[in-house]
Image (spheres, rainbow, N blue to C red):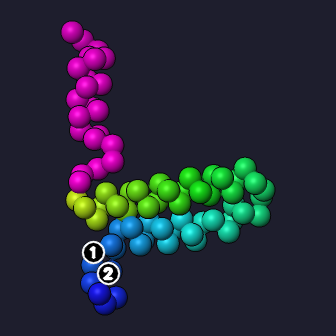
Amino acid sequence: MNWKQIWEDYKGRLLGTAAAIFLIPIYLFFGFWNMLFCALLLYVGYTIGKYKDIDQGPLIPWKELLDWLNARWRPFK
């Protein structure tokens, strides 16, 4: 497997993880609890990239959520 194929197959995961790794040193200087927050950032970046790679759709189904909210809290029934 060459680098071009890896980039094409895992582009979202690589970019999400790279963005999180870029932000981690900023938070590491502030203590242990912030380091745990960095681990959360890394996980979120990887997960969002993974959803982008497999074209599963958005992580939060915004259209369905807005439709539900509109049906639930319609101002003039």
Q: Secondary structure at mark 1?
A: helix
Q: CA distance from mark 2 to mark 1?
A: 5 Å
Q: Quick check: is 55 in the magenta stretch?
A: no
- Quadrant in which the C terminus is drawn: top left
| Drawn side of residue 13 relative to residue 73, left or right | right
Q: For the residue marked with disc 2, what is the amino acid?
A: Ile
Q: Residue at x 54, y 65 (%)?
A: 20
Q: Secondary structure at mark 2?
A: helix
Q: Position of residue 33 (x, y in %)?
A: 72, 50
- Which quadrant would residue 25 be assigned to in this image? bottom right
Q: Position of residue 58 (x, y in %)?
A: 29, 50
Q: Quick check: is 67 in the magenta stretch?
A: yes
- Which quadrant would residue 49 be assigned to in this image? bottom left
| Drawn side of residue 33 relative to residue 51, left or right | right
Marks 2,1: beta carbons within 8 A = yes
In the rendered picture of this protein, how many numbered marks are placed on residues?
A: 2
Neighbours of disc 2 within 10 Å: few (<14), some (14-19), many (20+): few
- Quadrant in which the N terminus is drawn: bottom left
Please give the residue where the numbered disc 1 appears in the rendered image: 9
Q: For the residue marked with disc 1, what is the amino acid?
A: Asp
Q: Residue at x 24, y 12 (%)?
A: 76
Q: Position of residue 34 (x, y in %)?
A: 70, 53
Q: Which residues are magenta?
A: 56-77
Q: Is residue 76 placed above or below 3 in the rendered structure?
A: above
Q: Position of residue 31 (x, y in %)?
A: 78, 56
Q: Residue at x 69, y 57 (%)?
A: 35
Along the viewing direction, whichever of 17 and 2 lies nearer the viewer: 2
Q: Residue 6's mark?
A: 2
In this view, the residue farthest toward the front is: 1
Q: Residue at x 39, y 67 (%)?
A: 13
